[in-house]
Amino acid sequence: MKIITAKDYSNMSEIAASTILERVKQSSKITLGLATGGTPVKTYNYLINDYKNNKTSYQHVVTFNLDEYTGMKPTNPNSYHYYMEKNLFEHIDIPNNQTHLPNGAADDFELECKTYEQKIAEHNGVDLQILGLGSNGHIGFNEPGTAFDTRTHIVDLSSATRKANARYFDNIDEVPTQAITMGIATILESKEILLLVSGERKSRALEKLLHGEIDTSFPASILNQHKNVTIIADNEALKYV
Ligand code: GLP
């Protein structure tokens, strides 16, 4: 895995955004895998600023997000649909029908998972996947213990993850207990992966990713087996590496 050291969160976000922009400009058609959470917010900000200043077009871009909470309508401000609209999509020229997130309000989750996988396959998989890192090693919402061969599926969120994400809700009881996530095998099929890691809070997880064993107890560890992963991490996150 290639590691790029960034000074701080802003610098990490700037490097991530310029890598994404480079790929978007280079290609006539590209499928991006997108992440939510706190980490990529500023990366998306840089993309929005670039759009304002340089009008880089996203007409040829298709996106698939990693995950969504179950039981949440796209209009719910805590949904990842809403997050993506507000933090990126509504500010750039990407056509609505080219952005995809799992439907957390689907009636039939099994069907929703299958359909999501099919749609990704129809676009020949993800070209560039943006990933954040959970403190417990989760990628997407694939919690510790998830098999490496999983496709898009429903997960029970661990109490650690619910606690970590409670900051976005009024209280922890409002954090959903389940989510739909791309599986680990789905993520690993991306042709290129950019893992963004920022802050002290993630430093032990990054240490484990780089120096620990490849094991399902730490899902991100499987990234060591992917041929094209770049980690963009800031100094605080790299403190134990
Ligand atoms: C969340 C998301 C992940 C994200 C990770 C880290 O629960 N489902 O996609 O990458 O956890 O979140 P954050 O960037 O807020 O630390």
Image: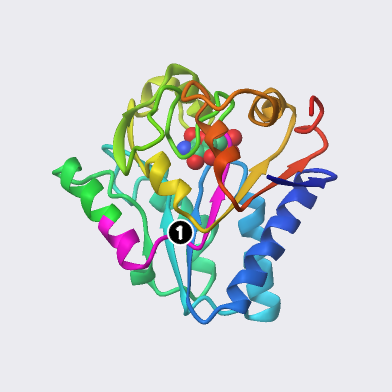
Image quadrant for the N terminus? top right
Which residues are the magenta region? 118-133
- In the image shown, does 45 or 123 lie closer to the viewer? 123
Q: Amino acid at mark 1?
A: Glu
* Along the viewing direction, whichever of 150 and 227 lies nearer the viewer: 227
Vertical side of 162 occupied by 223: above or below: below
In the rendered image, the vertical position of residue 213 relative to residue 106, given as above or below: above
> What is the count of numbered marks?
1
Q: Residue at image x 28%, y 54%?
A: 116
Give the side of residue 96 with respect to residue 34, left or right.
left
Which residue is painted at 38% across and 66% down in the image?
124
* Mark 1 neighbour density, 10 Å: few (under 14) some (14–19) many (20 or more): some
How is this picture coloured? Answer: rainbow
**Secondary structure found at label 1:** helix
Q: Which residue appears farthest toward the top when viewing the image?
A: 159
One can see residue 168 in this view:
no
Q: Which residue is mark 1?
A: 85
Q: Position of residue 160 (x, y in %)?
A: 49, 19
Residue 127 inside the magenta-drawn segment: yes
- Residue 3 place in picture, x, y as percent: 75, 45
